[in-house]
């Protein structure tokens, strides 16, 4: 097997558009029931990285594209620092595109989006925690859920975007510029993280009451909160648009552990007042429309077509990056006001559940979308995490107040925001 | 565990005020957090590259001082000598920044050295009457020396396959300059440039023939479209 890989279609753009204002990182965390032993964690990482050889890479610059090459050094585990989702430095991180952190009872995985999406990251972290618990002497049957018990499949490194690219599909997807939140941001690029634990039964009750899915419900609440906080936005002529990453593995067969998700979107205008029910109606219809198979194929095709254009392919990387930066500004960054990423249910073997208290997911933020939300479901609980560089916390406050006013029991943990 | 009476949510914290609305929190139980949920904030230390900044400072000051002294004390018709200092300072800066402080691979450093020394000797030549010794002799000799150094590096050091490509590209660029000087007859003395170009070509072919498989795979990696 070759010891190098081309970047998948989604990843091709990230190295060129990642800068001090936009890190393209995300963090997944498993909180266990006992304090983490770093020596055992390092051994677990050594075992896990062998199964996930695809993660054992570093990013290199080619003449026409970036690519991934085998990283000959060993990945290390690090103690968490006060800063969440700090950008990766080639030197400090030994070239790796992920980092494994521990603190108190928590194991976290921070990943650069070039490597994989939330699904791939959660598979890696699940396996890491499973191996850690095994090395700690716990007896756990993997139940076919943990990948290190199964063979490495070559299809895991496939670019599923290319596999689902059809030339006859309509490749046009028009992007609408959205309004963005402006406000004072923390010094030192501090990212404030607020995680709320919500019972599944409360969410189910609300979803039944409004007859919608969890993602639709949360999107609607965010839009309602945005409406009541219009003052925070620039340019109200543009709509407030929520980007919702959708895991395409639910719609197309794929065992790929690389990026295979795209963003669907839903928008409202902040100029007129809408009731919760009116917003929900818009969100439901837009999301259902976006998730239609033809539309998903169009989104895939509209992204892949750039990669296939001969003129773009033969442009040297340093020129291509300029075009990619502009393209991303128009179709990736400008249309995004807020990103709501719902990873859904994180499945772990039943014998492992007694050792894992929480599973949380924090999305990174950028200067155009300074506040975002990550959602996970584990063991009858939902974990909603706001990550924000904004000092003003009106959005988080109104969001949680909405839920508590609907009778939802919330327990909040934050990373203490006064800096 | 505490509770905010205005937001009506429980907050697992030791804070006295609500992180969402700043109202005073009520205690739900007497338990304190055994450890903060996240490591406590510590101000970031700035990455000060003091050494490089000192070098830049010294180079700029020296250049400015010599420029002023030269212009003030110059007698009419006398040659300017500050360009020697300015070019040398620039070379020192490139030397420290690119060759000493950076982590680029060796072939790239050799290439940069060759180009910067060439520019330095050309400037010295130009401002000292321009007899052409720089482009006639020194630059081709530099080119041969650089190609030779690349060969020594390849033989002596256990070079990663990826370095072969850089060595190839470097040796081509190192050879092209005297080649262009020779073919367009820019220089009055031709044989040093021709020799340098041929030497470079030899190194290039040697790398391709002797490091064939590794080079091919590296080529595919770096040049895939």
Image: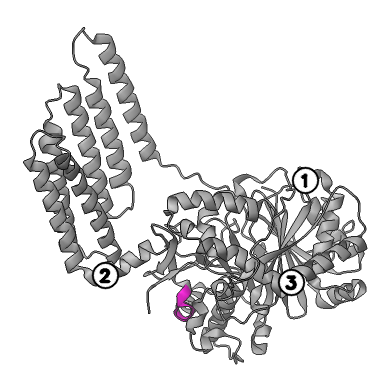
Q: Chain of mark 2?
A: B
Eyeballing the image, is A286 above or below A148?
above
Question: Which residue is situated farthest in the top direction here?
Answer: B76
Per the rendered image, the range of residues in magenta is A47-54
Measuring 57% from the left and 79% from the top, which residue is drawn there? Answer: A129
Chain bearing mark 1:
A
**Quarter-wise, where is residue A241 in the image?**
bottom right
Disc sitting over residue B214 in the figure: 2
Tag nearer the camera, 1 or 2: 2
Q: Give residue A375's quadrant in the image.
A: bottom right
Colour mapping used in the image: one colour
- Let me know if residue B17 appears in the view: no
Q: Which percent across, then down, holds residue A222?
A: 81, 59
Q: Which residue is mark 1?
A: A233
Label 3 neighbourhood size at 10 Å, few (<14), some (14-19), many (20+)? some
**Secondary structure character of the magenta stretch overall:** helix
């Amino acid at each position: 097997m070759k010891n190098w890989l081309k970047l998948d279609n989604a990843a091709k753009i990230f190295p060129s558009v990642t800068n001090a204002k936009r890190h393209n990182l995300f963090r997944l965390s498993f909180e266990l029931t006992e304090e983490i032993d770093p020596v055992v964690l390092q051994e677990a990482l050594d075992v896990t990285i062998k199964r996930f050889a695809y993660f054992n890479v570093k990013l290199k610059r080619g003449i026409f594209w970036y690519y991934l090459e085998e990283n000959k050094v060993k990945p290390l585990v690090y103690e968490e620092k006060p800063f969440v989702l700090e950008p990766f430095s080639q030197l400090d991180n030994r070239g790796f595109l992920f980092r494994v952190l521990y603190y108190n009872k928590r194991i976290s995985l921070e990943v650069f989006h070039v490597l994989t999406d939330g699904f791939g990251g959660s598979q890696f972290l699940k396996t890491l925690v499973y191996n850690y618990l095994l090395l700690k002497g716990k007896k756990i049957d993997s139940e076919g859920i943990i990948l290190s018990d199964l063979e490495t499949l070559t299809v895991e490194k496939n670019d599923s975007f290319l596999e689902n690219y059809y030339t006859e599909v309509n490749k046009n997807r028009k992007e609408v510029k959205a309004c963005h939140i402006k406000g004072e941001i923390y010094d030192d690029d501090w990212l404030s993280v607020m995680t709320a634990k919500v019972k599944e039964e409360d969410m189910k009750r609300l979803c039944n009451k409004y007859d919608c899915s969890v993602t639709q419900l949360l999107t609607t609440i965010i839009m309602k909160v945005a409406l009541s906080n219009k003052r925070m936005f620039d340019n109200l002529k543009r709509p407030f648009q929520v980007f919702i990453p959708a895991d395409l593995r639910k719609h197309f067969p794929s065992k790929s552990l690389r990026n295979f998700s795209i963003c669907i979107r839903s928008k409202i205008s902040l100029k007129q007042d809408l009731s919760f029910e009116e917003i929900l109606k818009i969100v439901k219809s837009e999301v259902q429309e976006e998730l239609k198979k033809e539309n998903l194929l169009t989104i895939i095709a509209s992204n892949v077509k750039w990669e296939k254009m001969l003129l773009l392919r033969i442009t040297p990387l340093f020129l291509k990056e300029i075009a990619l930066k502009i393209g991303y500004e128009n179709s990736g960054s400008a249309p995004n006001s807020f990103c709501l990423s719902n990873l859904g249910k994180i499945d772990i073997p039943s014998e492992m559940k007694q050792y894992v208290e929480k599973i949380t997911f924090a999305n990174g933020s950028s200067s155009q979308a300074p506040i975002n939300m990550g959602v996970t479901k584990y063991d009858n609980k939902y974990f909603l995490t706001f990550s924000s560089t904004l000092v003003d916390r009106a959005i988080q406050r109104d969001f949680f107040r909405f839920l508590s006013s609907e009778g939802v029991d919330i327990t909040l943990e934050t990373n203490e925001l006064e800096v | 565990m505490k509770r905010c009476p205005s937001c009506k949510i429980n907050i697992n914290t030791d804070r006295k005020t609500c992180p969402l609305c700043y109202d005073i929190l009520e205690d739900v139980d007497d338990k304190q957090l055994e450890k903060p949920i996240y490591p406590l904030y510590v101000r970031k230390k700035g990455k000060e590259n003091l050494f490089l900044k000192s070098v830049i400072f010294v180079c700029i000051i020296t250049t400015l001082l010599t420029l002023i002294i030269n212009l003030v004390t110059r007698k009419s018709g006398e040659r300017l000598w500050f360009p020697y200092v300015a070019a040398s300072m620039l070379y020192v800066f490139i030397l420290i920044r690119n060759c000493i402080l950076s982590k680029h691979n060796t072939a790239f450093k050799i290439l940069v050295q060759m180009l910067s020394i060439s520019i330095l000797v050309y400037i010295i030549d130009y401002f000292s009457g321009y007899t052409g010794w720089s482009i006639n002799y020194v630059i081709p000799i530099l080119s041969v020396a650089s190609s030779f150094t690349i060969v020594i590096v390849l033989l002596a050091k256990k070079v990663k396959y990826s370095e072969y490509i850089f060595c190839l590209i470097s040796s081509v660029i190192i050879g092209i300059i005297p080649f262009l000087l020779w073919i367009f007859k820019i220089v009055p003395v031709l044989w040093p440039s021709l020799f340098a170009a041929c030497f470079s070509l030899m190194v290039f072919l040697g790398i391709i023939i002797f490091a064939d498989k590794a080079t091919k795979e590296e080529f595919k990696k770096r040049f895939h479209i």
